[in-house]
Image: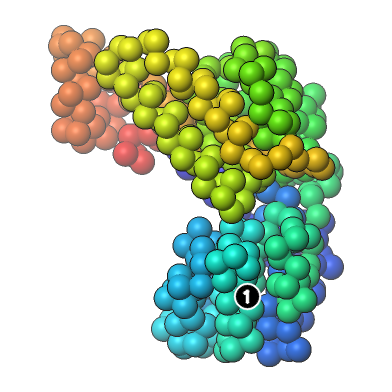
Amino acid sequence: MKPWTEKYRPKKFEEIKGNEEIVKKINDFLENFPNKKKAILLGGPPGVGKTTIVHVFANELDKEIFELNASDLRNKDKLNEILKPALQQKSLLKDDKIILIDEVDGISGSDRGGIPELIRLIKETNYPLIATANDTWNKKLSPLRKESLVVELKNSKEKDTRDLLINILKEENKFLKMEILNQIIENAKGDLRAAINDLQILSHLEKPEESIVDERNKEESIFNVLKEVFQEKADNKMLGLFDKVGMPFDEIILWIEENIPNVYSGEELVKAYQRLAKVDLFKGRIYKQQYWRFMVYENIFLSYGISASKQEAKSGFFRYQKPERILKIWLNNQKTAKRKTIAEKYAKMVHVGIKRVMYEWPEIKNILKNPLIQKELKLDEDEISYLKRS
């Protein structure tokens, strides 16, 4: 099952709602390149569609897109090794190209030469460069702002989000009550990607109205906990924070992992990821060796350890977001569940054990693609669709 965020990603200008003025600004910049400024700093909260809009421009203007993530361009050496050739070499496939640097917030500041080197390369580039950032007003991006056209994408309006969700449900032949749709939109707080992810999950549940209330309560709790971990000064009270959240510990790990780069940078980011790695280490020991006493260390590193990675308490607003890996895990579980129901029907028909069918699945699934066998097993539309994709 393909994530709906990918399946329904905009591909044309008219599919971009609520940011028409921004589309015009970017279009004027690209059509008149080179301008006084050779780069765009494209800002906006997570899930608003920053990367998507750049891909739409590449598609509509028939340009190649050369995409890099800031995690690959941490310092001066990496910028010269990876980005410099892309800024100078001609496109292999098209007449022109766009250079996209995603999450430019992740490039090191002046301490490791990252941002100054990026600015030097921008002045030499032969092609337009677009850099995305969650917070264009981050202090370390100040030099980049001076050399770039700063453009801020707005969150999707409720009406536009509602219309999009309804259209997706029609395309998928699914139905949800309007109050559930409204709750999805409220929970997403303008994050279109989060809204579509929630829509996909809830539309496959038997009782979505029960799940969304429970999910809302859990998210309110986890957002409060994230704020304490990432922004408050680390102390012993951190050790009991996760007891307040009605959520499995493995899911809390995903929330922490997703939001570390939204709050931390530089040395703080490095320390936080090192401590998250320790969490994963103890998690592996617990599962492999059944050493449940190690859970206390797992909790220490994830709560106090992550919190103590920062130099001081952080004021201001940070936008915490739902981890996308939850959707990917859910999609995988859906695939496994569908395979199991088909295997159960087949095992019953041929009088063998379910374990044997699952073990021999690579061969058996080809047999099950026969329409006559599907009819004999009384497979439903979802099961048949799963077999076609597998």
* In the foreground, 21 or 341: 21
The answer to whether one can see residue 90 in this image is yes
Instruction: Residue at 58% x, 77% y: name it.
Output: 117
Q: Position of residue 237 (x, y in %)?
A: 67, 17
* In the foreground, 79 or 20: 79
The quarter of the rendered structure image containing the N terminus is top left
Seen in the picture, residue 129 relative to 4 is either above or below; the reply is below
- Where is residue 93, by image quadrant? bottom left
Seen in the picture, residue 254 relative to 246 is either above or below; the reply is below
Q: Secondary structure at mark 1?
A: helix
Q: Position of residue 222 (x, y in %)?
A: 67, 24
Residue type beneath disc 1:
Pro
Label 1 neighbourhood size at 10 Å, few (<14), some (14-19), many (20+)?
some
Q: What is the basis of the colouring in this image?
A: rainbow
Q: In the rendered image, which residue does mark 1 sit on? A: 116
Give the tally of numbered discs.
Answer: 1
The answer to whether one can see residue 324 in this image is no
Seen in the picture, residue 306 relative to 43 is either above or below; the reply is above
The quarter of the rendered structure image containing the C terminus is top left
Seen in the picture, residue 116 relative to 189 is either above or below; the reply is below
Image-based side of 21 in relation to 199, left or right:
right
Q: Position of residue 255 (x, y in %)?
A: 58, 32
Image-based side of 72 in relation to 224, left or right:
left
Instruction: Residue at 73% x, 25% y: name it.
Output: 224
* In the foreground, 344 or 381: 344
Q: Position of residue 373 (x, y in %)?
A: 25, 26
Instruction: Residue at 16% x, 17% y: name it.
Output: 356
Image-based side of 82 in relation to 125, left or right:
left
- Where is residue 294, by image quadrant? top left
Instruction: Residue at 23% x, 32% y: name it.
Output: 365
